[in-house]
Amino acid sequence: MLAPIGEEIWTAEGPEVEVAGFHYPLRMAVIRLGSGGLFIWSPVALDEGLREAVAALGTVRFLVAPNSLHHLYLAEWQSAFPEAEIWGPARLAAKRKDLTFDGILEDAPPAAWEGEIDQVLVTGNLITDEAVFFHEKSGTVIFTDLLQHFPPGGFSGWRALIAKLDLMTGDEPHVPRKFRRAFIRRRAAREALRRVLAWPASQVLMAHGAPVRTGARAFLERAFRWLF
C-alpha cells in the first residue's frame, strides 16, 4: 500500500483517472516531517487500507494539491483527517470554492515545512501553475504534470499516436508538448526551473510515470533543455 522510496518518504498508487479516453495512473507521496506530522502530496482516492497505513505513520498535518488539476480527492481526505490543513496554488483555490484552503502555495516554502521541503512555483503556463517540491532528507524532486511517462504499449489506435506526438511515451519522462506550448511566460518558467536544477537531486518523483532513481540531475537537465 505504502512503499518507502527514501528516508521519511513513501508513495502510494491510486486508481486510474480517465481524461478524454486516456487513462492516467496516479501516485501520491507521504513525507514525515521532523515534528512527526505528515505532508500528503497529491492525494489519491482514499480507501480504508490506505487510511490506516497513513495514520500508522503519524498525524496528517497537510493535504497538498500541487496544481489546479490534482484536486479530485481533497474533500474525502479532509473528511477523514479533519484537522489537516489544505494547501494549493491560487488558481486551484479560485477553482474549488467548495473547499476552504488554509494556505496558498507560493514561490517559497511556508514556515510549516521550511528547512525540510523546498518549493518552487512554476507559473506562466496556460494549463496550470505547478508547485515543484524538493524533499531535502531523501533528495527527492517531486513533479506532478510537468513531467510524464507512460509505457509505449499503454495506448491503442489514435490515442497511441497522440501520446507519441505529445511525448507521453518514449525512453524516459518528458515535458508533454501541450505543456511546452502552453508556456506564455517562458522567462518566468526558466527562472523557476533554474532553481529546480540547482537542487542536489538524488531521484525524481512524478504523478504519472515511474520514479527516476539514478542520474536525477542529468535527467532534469535533459528534460528541460528545450526551455533554455
Image (cartoon, rainbow, N blue to C red):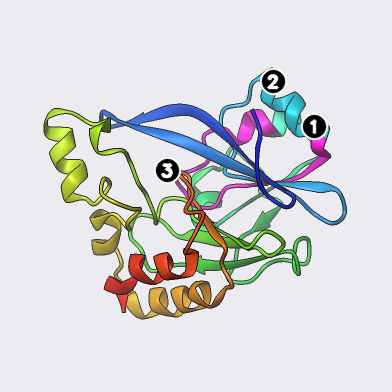
Residue 141 percent location from the top left of the image: 55, 60
Residue 63 percent location from the top left of the image: 67, 44
Are the residues tagged 3 and 2 within 8 Å (C-beta)? no
The structure residue drawn at horizontal position 12% and vertical position 29%, both measured from the top left corner, is: 157
71 inside magenta stretch: yes
Q: Secondary structure at mark 3?
A: loop
Amino acid beneath label 2: Gly
- Taking the image as shown, residue 136 lies to the left or right of residue 111, namely left
Amino acid beneath label 3: His
Cα separation, mark 3 vs mark 1, equals: 25 Å
Please give the range of residues in magenta: 57-77
Cα separation, mark 2 vs mark 1, equals: 10 Å
Residue 215 percent location from the top left of the image: 47, 64
- Numbered label attached to residue 49: 2
Residue sticking out furthest to the right? 35
Residue at image mark 3: 208
Residue at image mark 1: 55
The structure residue drawn at horizontal position 42% and vertical position 44%, both measured from the top left corner, is: 209
The structure residue drawn at horizontal position 23% and vertical position 31%, both measured from the top left corner, is: 155
Q: Secondary structure at mark 1?
A: helix
Q: Earlier in the sequence, mark 3 or mark 2?
A: 2
The quadrant in which the N terminus is found is top right
Residue 187 percent location from the top left of the image: 36, 81
Amino acid beneath label 1: Ala
Q: Residues within 10 Å of mark 2 (few under 14, many from 20)?
A: few
